[in-house]
Amino acid sequence: MKMLRIKKDDQVKIISGKDKGRSGKVLEVLPKDGKVIVEGLNIHVRFARARRKGEKGQRLELSAPIWVSKVMLICPACGKTTRIGHEKTENNSYRQCKKCGRRI
């Protein structure tokens, strides 16, 4: 299991790929795969057949996982994309914005 610096509900910006420059909220983190699912980004279309008579098939648009290396955290304090550092105190460890120095 990999230790990822991006957590659920973080605001991130896509830095490469078809959605480059767009941002969204992290819905799910997949640490075994090293991927994250971002709300409304990396959309893939799936088609579902009708299961019963009289029911219609559907076109489903789903957010697919994206590599964590292709996203960058947006600092909630300064609003800039930033790398993540760690600040350790006696009892806890905190994530820290590398640009403004505040805790995330």
Image: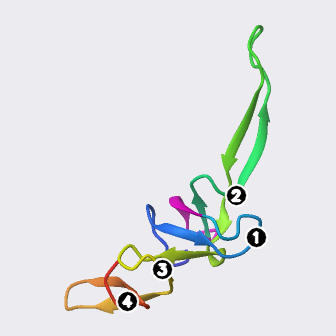
| Residue 9 position in % (x across, y down) | 43, 61
Q: Which mark identifies residue 17? A: 1
Viewer-proximal residue among 44 and 91:
44
Q: Residues within 10 Å of mark 3 (few under 14, many from 20)?
A: some
| Distance from Cα at disc 4 to Cα at disc 2 | 29 Å
| Residue 79 position in % (x across, y down) | 43, 76
What's under tag 4, amino acid-wise? Cys
The mark nearer the N terminus, 3 or 2, is 2
The mark nearer the N terminus, 4 or 1, is 1
Q: Is residue 65 left or right of residue 72?
A: right
The magenta stretch spans residue 29: yes
The stretch of residues the image draws in magenta is: 23-34
The mark nearer the N terminus, 3 or 4, is 3
What's under tag 3, amino acid-wise? Lys
Q: Which mark identifies residue 42? A: 2
| Distance from Cα at disc 1 to Cα at disc 3 | 20 Å
Q: How is the image coloured?
A: rainbow
Q: Secondary structure at mark 4?
A: loop
What's under tag 2, amino acid-wise? Asn
Q: Secondary structure at mark 1?
A: loop
